[in-house]
Amino acid sequence: MAEKANPADDARRRCLCLADAIGRLPPSLLAGSCKRTLLKLAESELSFLSRRASSSSPSPSDSPLSVNIGHLEAVVHILRRLPVTGVSRVCKPVPLLPASGKVRRTDAGSKFAHVDIVCTLKGNPVWVVVSDRNPKYVTWHDGCKGKGLRLRIQQVVAAAQFSRTLRPSSIILFFSRGVTDSILKKTVDEFGAIKYKMEADFPLSIVGFLEEMEGEWINIIARSYQEAVVLEIKVDSFEKPARDPEWGAGESILVAGEAENPEGNVNLNCPATFDTLISGLRPAMKGKDMASAKTREVLSGGDLINFDTTALIALVSDISNGGAEKLLNAAESELRQRFKGNLPFVIAQANSEIQKPILPELGAVICRKNGVICESVISEFKELIAMYGGTKEKLRADQILKWLTVVPDNPSDRMIGLLTTRKLAQKNKVVFGTGDYWHAPTLTANMAFVRAVSQTGMSLHTIEHRPHALTGN
């Protein structure tokens, strides 16, 4: 007869596997501080279980086990399975500021609302709140055993509306073990929630956390999310009732457009020369069309891409367009005269280009997109081209500008809300903030600014590329 499994031992194994899964999350997905937070929480659970095992209690198996392992597993499951980017906060409280205007403060005794993930999803800033409770214990109103779901949602929505820099467009409620029909109906009726259709993005199949034993990987924990229910609340309209009893007639902004490639793999079928690359862009739109709110709504599903100056320079640089080898073969004295103190960086860029050409990478990102640039970028780009660009680089600059739509400098409110500092320069806030206003990722090599924004806790949708300089050719 098989020996009965020990729940405490199973819980410890789950913690160890969870910590391993956290450690394997790619650095490109979330900030190092977020990974450290998750690891600290997993280690805290493991420490609790270890203390419990060594306790002198006569019957430790009768006392409840850790209640947070399943919650952390669900958070990691979302990070691994949902195509999120720019994760800037995990399992952290968000300040619930005093009310102003039409929204009331929901609980005078609360100063914070708990949010599990602050991230970007399909170009839109999103907050994710996870519940791993047994559905029959999820109550709508406050009770003797804790805060009701209604108050929790009120606090999160209020925090979202009051937060200027972290403000999301939507709040995702992930009930990992499902939710009762009664709670579901109340969430839809009171908060205008709609069901997030997960088939394309979010496989809810059985997911295994893996443990390595003697050099081999075996599946020791399998957890099903088949019963999970995922709802979306749009922050600006949460007070409105559902538009349709069957989850609303309007399509969620989170399912508009095709799913992005979370792994960042390059499509080798995309253009690999400058001419074919820019012709892969959609034709520039007229300014009056871009100015309409309807256009912004239609394009917010992933059709737009915002170029900063570094991206335009990389596209037209002679290094990117077949000139890398010629540059490396030039006399050192000539190169020092041309590039002075920047020579080591230019040489490194040329070597990088020979090893891995940049145009296929950029082509995979911008192919079939509407390219936009703000007025500040086109002004700076034209100035740099006039000062440092060569004949061929100036010709490419003229060509690419014909394919891009110029929009006014119009940074989003949350970007304006960031305190301007040396690292968070005003000109960069304008460029990246305009992309954020249009719900468009910004293609950039300015990772110093991206890191500075991440350190504030804001999730910003950006796509990194390698920097390439103008050569004067």
Image: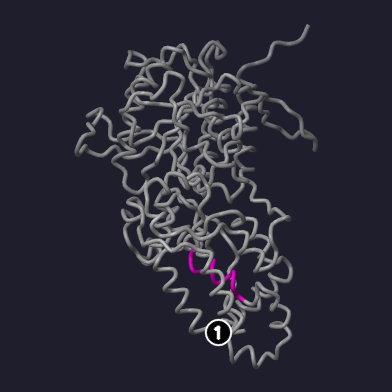
Q: Is residue 443 above or below residue 210?
A: below
Quadrant including the C terminus: bottom right
Q: Amino acid at mark 1?
A: Gly
Q: Is residue 446 above or below residue 334?
A: above
Q: Nearer the viewer, residue 134 or 32?
A: 134
Q: Is residue 373 magenta?
A: no
**Image location of residue 114, percent across then percent down:** 39, 33
Q: Given the current orientation, which residue lies at the most extreme left position?
A: 101
**Image location of residue 143, percent across then percent down:** 33, 14
Quadrant including the N terminus: top right
**Left or right relative to 123: residue 349:** right
Judging from the image, the colouring scheme is one colour
Q: Nearer the viewer, residue 250 or 48?
A: 250
Q: Nearer the viewer, residue 34 or 15?
A: 34
Q: Secondary structure at mark 1?
A: helix
Residue at 80% in and 38% down:
215
Q: Which residues are magenta?
A: 308-317
Q: Given the current orientation, which residue lies at the most extreme top position?
A: 1
State whether the magenta stretch is mostly helix, strand or loop.
helix
Residue at 51% in and 15% down:
64
**Image location of residue 206, percent across then percent down:** 66, 24
**Left or right relative to 306: residue 362:** right
Q: Which residue is mark 1?
A: 341
Residue 278 position by quadrant: bottom right
Residue at 41% in and 48% down:
457
Would you call the spot at circle 1 few (<14 residues within 10 Å), some (14-19), or many (20 or more)?
few
**Image location of residue 224, percent across then percent down:** 63, 22
